[in-house]
Image: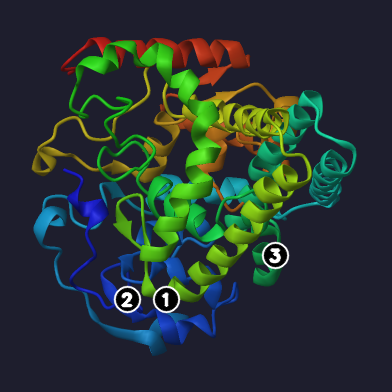
Amino acid sequence: LGGSATMADPRLKQNEVILEGWVYDLDAFGSKHPGGAGALNMFGGSDATTHYYMLHPHQQIRTKALEPFKLRKAESPTGPKAELGDSAFLLNTQAYQDLKQRVRKAIPYQFATWEWYVKAVAIMGLSAYLEYDSVASGFAFWKSAILGVLMAMIGLCIQHDANHGAVSPKGWVNRVWGFTQDWIGGSALLWKHHHVLMHHAETNVEGDDPDITGELIRFNKLTTWKGHHKWQAFYTWFLLPLLPLSWHFKEIYDLSVMRHCDRKMSSMARQEALFALAFRFVFIFRFYAIPLYFHPSLHTAACILTCLGVGGAYLGVNFVISHNFEGAKSVLNTADRAKHTRRDWAFDQVETSSTVGGRILGFFHGGLNYQIEHHLFPRISHVHYHKLQPVVQQWCLDNKIKYTYYKSLPENIASCYKHLSMLGNAKQIG
């Protein structure tokens, strides 16, 4: 079932990409791409049709501009992809085009505003100061806890917009701010491979979406049930604080072998991977080695773990509740993909996601509490999501699509708990 996500596409070279059934030379087009060649590297060797429509405001592929880079008609997919083709969804439907038109009227400028830049500079400045002060003046649990929140906010409020290309129409601006993911011990490259290439295009598709595919936690009814899943509604929350430790060290291997989320990375991104590795070793030296060198004690180690735990919990809770709640749609209803009926990609983005709270929560969560809006338009900066919400809600009403909204974070968390409990206690659902 998971083969379509994990295998390289045998129809393509690593510097080629498929758009609407045609193969294009991605390497040659990179020099002409308005967002820069770097924004394209992760798509090498893939079908990027879904991503094209998801990331661009225009309604049709600009075939005239791409014509000089067209190589050939793509062959029909083979192997695990033969049953579903290149997408599990209907793409670029009239309904989605209608939504794009409505959004363009409501939000003429989709990128970051002064509000975003003021918040970003403040978060980065305070985070850097707390790191410095902890080394210069000594570690304290309260300082480490605040630093954990700030590092999570860098991930949610700054790098997230930047690595989706939502900060600026200028590619270099997005790349610079995107490296804040590397500053907090992650990797902009791996994040884009995981979230942009895989998760956003295949949300809640078991085997293809890395956020719901795995054995430790049963996030989807098609995941094979195991005995420990009976307890997942309880233990999941205690695993979230451990996420940063896994990211900081496991990803070194992923960058080295150019494979992440059990999927080979495009060789076009090799230079980015080498840079990410260098940045990772600098981070480990800065975040772990220097503090323990100047303050070699269990107290220092405990403060570092407090920072990681608080940050991991902040990030983890935000993401786990977004697509795992009572009534969350599973795109595939059976393990037999040949029986799958395609549905509008935009409809399924709405019904596999939930929105919680409002603008205040969005300020601290980088707008990712507006998960429905974000998944429909990931390249719109989060500072606009409060304006985007009523447009999307009306569109959902007009198209009879279920829009899941929670008034508060505790309400959303409770729904996620019940969802995990239901999946953990039922060996087969549906």
Q: Counting other residues with Cα less than 10 Å from the Cα at mark 3, is it few (<14), some (14-19), or many (20 or more)?
A: few
Residue 297, how many percent across, how many down?
A: 71, 33
Q: Residue at x 54, y 25 (%)?
A: 317
Residue 423 position in % (x across, y down): 28, 16
The percent coordinates of residue 252 (x first, y second) are: 47, 56
Disc with the residue nearer the chain's start (3 vs 2): 2
Evaluate if marks 1 and 2 touch, with contact meaning CB atoms under 8 Å apart. yes
Q: Which mark is residue 11?
A: none
Q: Is residue 254 left or right of residue 317?
A: left
Q: Earlier in the sequence, mark 3 or mark 1?
A: 3
* Residue topped by disc 2: 14
Q: Residue at x 16, y 55 (%)?
A: 81
**Relative to 167, does residue 367 appear above or below in the rendering?**
above
Tell me which corner region of the image, top left, top right, bottom left or bottom right, holds residue 292: top right
Labels 3 & 2 near each other (Cβ < 8 A): no
* Mark 1 residue element: helix
Q: Label 3, label 2: how many angstroms apart (C-alpha)?
A: 25 Å
Name the spot of residue 206 as percent of width and height, x first. Answer: 26, 37
> Label 1, label 2: how many angstroms apart (C-alpha)?
7 Å
Between residue 270 and residue 300, name the one nearer to us.
300
Q: Specify the quadrant that holds the N terminus.
A: top left
Q: Which mark is residue 176?
A: 3
Q: Which comes sooner in the sequence, label 1 or label 2?
A: 2
The kind of residue on which mark 3 rests is Val
Q: Residue furthest front?
A: 296
Regarding residue 367, the answer to whether it shows in the image is yes
The crowd level at tag 2 (other Cα within 10 Å; few <14, some 14-19, many 20+) is many
Residue 235 or 267: which is nearer the viewer? 235
Disc marking residue 268: 1
